[in-house]
Image: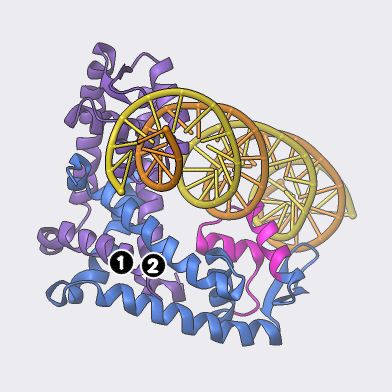
Chain colours: A blue, B purple, C yellow, D orange
Amino acid sequence: MNDPLANLPGYVLRRASSAALAGLNRRLSALSLRHVDASLLMLLNGQPGITQSEAGRILDIQRANMVPIVSRLEAKGLIDRQRVDGRSQGLYLSAEGEALHTQVLTVIDAYEQTLMEGVPAPLRKQAMAVLHAFWQSAEAAIESD
Amino acid sequence: MNDPLANLPGYVLRRASSAALAGLNRRLSALSLRHVDASLLMLLNGQPGITQSEAGRILDIQRANMVPIVSRLEAKGLIDRQRVDGRSQGLYLSAEGEALHTQVLTVIDAYEQTLMEGVPAPLRKQAMAVLHAFWQSAEAAIESD
DNA sequence: GCATTACTGTTATGCATGATAGCAGAATTA
DNA sequence: TAATTCTGCTATCATGCATAACAGTAATGC
């Protein structure tokens, strides 16, 4: 693997993320969910009643792109909408949604643990801090030149 | 930011990668390139004459998906193809391609440095090691259950 | 009270990345 | 020579992400 790109943090970040996502989606397919769906379920579990666009803001998903996601989950009977406003609606996990959420949690916890265990022990303590640092750094770097 | 997902390495990895990619693409648009194009130019600079499918294997891009990428770069006059075989062809940077590559290098080096500088100094030394560890761990986790 | 402004959900649309299946021609091997 | 493998390619589909526009609603300023 003579990859001259392996020195670039951005590239390695992308490859790691892409591989991690592939593994996650593979596991979530057993629940007929995509990772986006799973992330929304987890968010709604922690913050029930949140608005569609608030959820989008937290997950960094455009308002317009939330529509098919929420529709899909509602069509599956996993979430309920409840009017808050003339314009906004609170999102809640349905009973079915809560049940599935516990399964999602199991899958994801196991997966994230696997991911962490693959990191050599000496690095593990700082691993999350490094990831958060890159996240923050990258967000700051989007706008600047 | 009450994001319950912020504890999950996989999620943070994805968010960091997505933000990093957005920043990179923004910068590369000045050169009318996408990040995939840039990665291929860099690869060809380091390993001229490499085959299309070899490049795909290194960059983790399917054979079929390499076709439009290579065509695009060839149409732009950035790379040349040279038959090696009845079936395979070696890829090379053209003169134009080499010239653009130096610009790409400037942009990317500056960007990667910015990314790294955004990471707090105490973490910086191990940052790359952590990213590589996650990459490897995630690749290992794709197949296993 | 009313006009302006801002926000929400929505539709439509386009672009980029990835994945899969299948094919023809060439090379390799058994 | 026959069977297998590899390469580049076409076609097609799913997903993610971005932008523009619109109608209905809410909030704000005067």
Letter of the chain that mark 2 sits on in the rendering: B
Q: Is residue B100 above or below residue B139?
A: above
Amino acid type shown at disc 1: Ala
Q: Is residue B133 above or below residue D8?
A: below
Identified at 77% across, 62% down, the residue is A87
For disc 2, the neighbor class at 10 Å (few under 14, some 14 to 19, many from 20) is: few
**Residue A145 shows in the view:** no
Decide: is A141 above or below A121. above
Q: Which residue is mark 2?
A: B143
Check if mark 1's residue and mark 2's residue have beta carbons within 8 Å.
yes
Instruction: Place residue B7 in its image quadrant.
Output: bottom left
Label 2 element class:
helix
Check disc 1 and report the residue beneath it.
B140
State the CA–CA distance, disc 1 to disc 2.
7 Å
**Secondary structure found at label 1:** helix
Is residue A127 visible in this depiction of the protein?
A: yes
Quadrant hosting residue A88: bottom right
Q: Looking at the picture, how far across and down is residue A93, in whole percent?
A: 66, 80
